[in-house]
Every structure is written in C-alpha cells, then in structure tokens.
Image (spheres, rainbow, N blue to C red):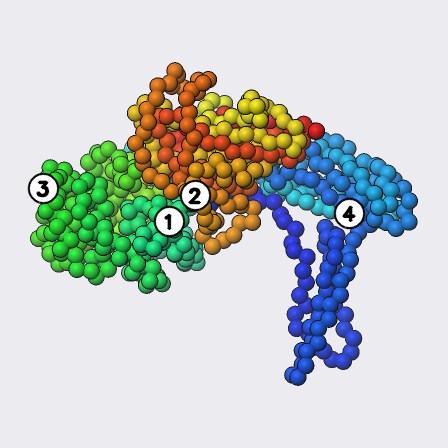
Amino acid sequence: LGKNLNPFKRKRDKPVAYWSGVKPATGEWQELTYNVPDYFNGSLQVMAVVVSNDSIGVDSKKSFIRGHFVITPSVPTFVSPGDEFTVGVAVANLIEKSGDPEVEISAETSIHLVLTTPKVQKVKIAENREASIHFNLKANEVLGSGTITIRATTAGMVSKASTDLSIRPAAPFITRLKPGHLKEDKVEIPVTRVMYPDYRQLHVALSHLPIGLARGLMAYLDTYPYLCTEQLVSKSFPLLALRQYPEFGFDAAKIIKSFDDSIRTLRARQNEEGAFGIWAANSHVSDFQTVYAAHFLTEAKEKNFPVPKDLLDRTLEYLKRLAGRDNSSLGDERISAYAIYILTRNGNLTSNYLASMQKRLTTLHKDTWGADLTAPLIAGAYQLLQKKDEAWSMLKRFKAGTKIPPEYADYYDGLVRDSLFIYILARHFPDRVTDLTPEVLLSALSPLWTGGYNTINSSLAILALTAYADATPVKQTVKAELDESGENDRFKPLIIPNGIFVKVPFSDKTKKLRLATKSAFPIFYIETEAGFDKKLPTQPIKENLEVYRDLVDSSGKSIDSIKLGEQVEVHLKMRTLQPNSYFPNVAVIDLLPGGFEVVLDTVRKDTTSSEESPQESGEGEAHEEDAVEGQGEGASHPPPTRVKFASPASFPVGTEKTTFAPEYVDVREDRVLVFGSIGPELKEFVYRIRATNEGSYLVPPTFSEGMYDRSAQTLSLGGKITVQGK
C-alpha cells in the first residue's frame, strides 16, 4: 500500500523448472519425476551432470511437451467490480488422427467473477487446426486475484488452462485522520466512509499524553503511497523513537526492515556531491530533505543501528557546504542552522559557522529570526558545544504555537517549526520541559486538528512527542468512555483496554463515535479511517485545485467507446483555482480502466524529462508488473504564469494551455502517477492507452493532492467506456 502498487495482484504462472538436488550415484538405475504444469506447452531441456573425484559427465536431451489441446485465453490484466468483459479463448487440436471432432469447451471461475454466458460451448476443431470462442464475464464485489479455468474435452481426452486477473477497486487507497483533544467534556465523531474490507483500518487511539497521536500518524505514514526521498525516510524515522514503546506494536523485525529499506533508498539517491536527490541520484535535490536525511542517519547511529560510515560521511561533507554558505533569505538560514545542528551532533566544531550566521541574522533579519525555527536550532547547537548561556539566549527568543504562513516549497509549516522546537527542548533542555504547558502543547499541535498533517510534519511530530514523553515522568492510564452507534442511532459502549496508549477498533457499520472523559488531564484522540472506498463520487471535489481527464480518439474527439486494439489519448488537464495560487509537490494518480494497457512509448515521449533512470520500486524490491518510466529534473517552484479564465469551476473550450512538464512520472500496470508543480496556467499531460479486451468498464476518478499542502485536493468524476469488437 505504501508504494502505490495494486495490492490485489493477479497470480502468475510459476516458471517451469525443476532441480533435483545432488543425488548419490549408486550404480543402480534411479528415476526422478517432475509433473509438468498443465499451462505449459513447448520444449523442455533436460540436463544431467555427474561428478566424481577424477571425472565429470554431462548429457542433455530435449523433450517436447504438449497436451491434447493448446488453450490460450485472452484476459484483461485487471478489472474493477461491476466491469463486464469478454474473454476470447483460442483452442488448438493436437490429437493425432482425431479427424474433425466436436470439442466441449467449458469455463469455471473463482468467487471474484461470474459468467454471463453459458459455461459450456461446443465447437468442431479439426486436427492441427484452431478455433476461437468467447465467454462473457462480470467482476463481483470481491477483490483479489480472480481465476478463470478453461477445459477442452473430447472422447475422454481433457486439457485445461487457468489464468488470473486482478479485481481491484476503481479508487485509490486513502487515509483520513480525525485528531482532537478534550478535557472534562464529550465529543461526537462522524464515521462517513464505506469501504471494502480488504486493508480497511477503523480505530481510535487514546492517551493522556500527546504521543498517543503517534498511532494514527504512523498509520498514515505506513500507507502513504508516494516515493520521494523525504517520504520514504519519514516512514522509518519515527520508528527509531517508538522502538522503546512496545504498546504501539512495532516489533524489532519491522523496525529493522524499515531502516534497511531507507538505507538502500539513500544509497541509491545520493549524488556525487553527497546530497540526496528527491527522486534519484541527480541534481534535482532539496537541501532541507538532505539535512533531514542526515538527521535520520544521526539518530539511527546514536541508537546503535548499523549506519554505513561512508554514507554518513559524504552527507556531512555536503552539510558543511550548507553550514558555511553566505545566505540572504531566512529560509536558507533555517536550513543552514539545521545543518549546523546536525554537524554538531556528529562531533564537528561549529563555532565559526554559528558566529557567521548570527552576524548575518542580526544584520538582515533582526526582527524576524528569533521567531523562526532558526533560533532553537542554533540553541541546540550551542547547548551541545556546552555554551549554555548562548543556548538559552537563543531559545528564549522563541514562542511555540505562533501561527505562521507555510512555506511548502521549503517543507516548512507551523507543525514542522513547533515539532523541532519541542524535540530540541525535550532532548537538550529537559529541565525546561515544564514550560510546555498543556495550552502550549495544544497550540503547537493545532494544525493536526484542522487536517494540516503531511509526511514531514507527521514524522517530526512523532519524534517531538516521543522526546516529550521521555522527559515527562507522569504517565496516566486512559480514563474515558467510548461508544459507537449504527443505523438506528443507538449508542453502545466499546471496551477501552487498560493502558497509557490504547487502540480501540470499531465496526464498519458504525456511523458515529462518542468519546467522553471526566478527567482534568486532557485526553488526546485520533480516529483513523483508511481503505478503498466502495462508492465513486457523484460530485467532483475541487479544493484549490482542479484536474480533469478527457479520453479522446485520434481526431481529438471525446469518446466513451472504442474498437478493440485501438488507442485512446488520455489528456490530463490541471490548474489551481485562484489566479495567484501555486502548489509545488502535487501528485496526480490516474487509475486506468480495466481492459486497457499503457502504451509506454507515449508516456516517455510526452514526459519532458531531461534524463531517465530506473525507478527504485520499493528500493530493492522488483515488482514485475511495474513499468519503469522517466523522471525529470527542474525547478521545484518556478514562478507562476498567470492567465484569465472564463470560469473558475470548469475548463472552457478553447482555453489556452501548455504542456505540463512533470518532475517525475511513474507508470504502473494499472495506473500512471505524475508529480510536479501546478499554478493557475492551464497545463496538459498526454499519454495513450490501448484497448485489449471487449467489454464495458468503469473509468476510475482521477485523484490529485498536494503532498505537503493538504488544502489542495481534487477528485474527478468517474465514467464508463465500452470496447467493441473489430
């Protein structure tokens, strides 16, 4: 789920291979048996090697394997529940001296599919001739790998062949969190989503310590579907801190695997300068992401994880360049301060860097830098250098919970700011943790209450709240009541287990939750609804962003039907809804309709990438259904070009548009993912798909979101497309 793959993969035929192992030669005849699978027809090479102390013998023979019939079904790679489609079956008669027999062809399916034509058909097939028949099927509301088994029978001779296809939902996996807090009060939480049972998560996490929010935030990070360097590191970083809290259920094996995956990713994406590319080892880098990755490596090293020395050393060399550069903007100073702090954590003497930075800050940003994250980062470095007076003078300038405008192009918002402050305070100034009153904590965490979470601030929030919990001696068991109600609006109690950090699952029939507490200690809760939605939207969602998909034929005309084997152009048109708005780091997920496949060369042609390299699918794990495509490098936040639109809610005919230049494109078996920055100018990304099977298919809605600015989201309407026979 966390790699944006189709989790309902079809089963594949295993390779036809056999290895006997080493057998002793006794001088007597021995027989080894291998049952060739029924799906194989062709030539097998049988090889034998005999070795003694002073000689070797080798022999091989070919064996031609074939059944009475060769059955070749043509099925879609994937479909969605409700899709109706046709499977063509070619049957070749290989029975010697059979003449022109009548052959009975039958079809059987797993529970994922239902036949809408008779399951048995009869056709005459002459010896060494081939005939074609068709079966019509419909996909049920059962997700997974659906199986179709075809049998050919005549005069007691039978051959069969089975093939599988993926039945996957026509919607992406989405995680929604509803965090909050209350004290001596009650709250009702609506449960709105109707989801398939597969991979569904429905639970509420409760704690009197804000670290209880980590359970829901980790559920969000674990299933986050994109693959940039920061996002992959953010899955692993909090686990380093949560390892000491077994109540959260993260075992050692999961933590080690997550760490190993991150190390593989960082190795693959470190460029010659020591920085980490956003998508690959190229010059398309983010200095903040590089320092953040260095922070992860440093934390792991201090917790005795096997961090490769060469990887960390090269990263620290790049951080020295950041620490020593002559900045003009406060955003750049913030990143340099972060680099100085991490260098100091690794035993580097950074006094000269700090002196130069303070001089620039007092000259260029005299009235603003004390309220910026720059101040606590400098304070942390001074504290490590045992310059406690200077450290405290920096730290007291800062006030947690201050509202600031986000700078998502630099991965900076209020929660990032306050999380790193809490982390530094709890780690390096534990005697000052009492300054974090409940009111200050609630203010610092306020972006969570309004849905302002993303991968970077969720990861840092968990890191901060773990450090805060470590420094807090009082840990109280949860004192609250939780009830759920279904269709009849009658509440029934849910059992809350004893513990400091508790997780309470609830039913998929639940329509509303009610949480109440009489405790004078604030209770923090986070409700999680994650899964694949059953119902497609009836109205488009457009939150500050609009993405529209059009399927057109070769003449440029919008279509809802096409001939088998023909190609369709997919036009993705995108823009922001406000004239002056601009969103960097936007992900567009375009799920394909069943019965189609991507024409790979058209994606490569339309991608204006300056380079291409293999995408690390899971960083070391090869996914055989994934086609690997280009990734581009370019400005992460170019200035927007402004144009006027006739309507803010739709794309008027004839609106001027330009080609969208993505920063990264990832082509999967059943979807195309496009990443880039979107402004008010209408942009268009075009690729083609090919019809592979007759039928009527759902066209899934296109989903897009700001990966960091969650105020930008859009979900288009789905539709239907028909593939007709030639």
- Residue 264 lies in quadrant: bottom left
Q: Which of marks 1 and 4 is nearer the N terminus?
A: 4
- Residue 439 lies in quadrant: top left
Q: Mark 4 points at which residue?
A: 70
Q: Which residue is drawn at 34% across and 51% down?
A: 276
The residue mark sitting in front, 4 or 2, is: 2
Question: What is the distance, in whole Å, between disc 4 and disc 3 at their CAs?
Answer: 82 Å
Q: Which of marks 4 and 2 is nearer the N terminus?
A: 4
* Circle 4 crowding by C-alpha within 10 Å: few under 14, some 14–19, many from 20: many
Please name the amino acid that badge 1 sits on. Answer: Asn
Work out whether 273 lies above or below 702.
below
Name, please, the residue furthest toward the top.
646
Q: Mark 3 points at which residue?
A: 363
Q: Name the residue under label 1.
A: 282
Q: Mark 2 points at which residue?
A: 631
Residue 404 location in percent, x, y?
22, 34
Tags 4 and 2 touching, CB below 8 Å:
no
Q: Which of marks 4 and 3 is nearer the N terminus?
A: 4
Please name the amino acid that badge 4 sits on. Answer: Val
Please name the amino acid that badge 3 sits on. Answer: Thr
Q: Is residue 29 left or right of residue 2?
A: right
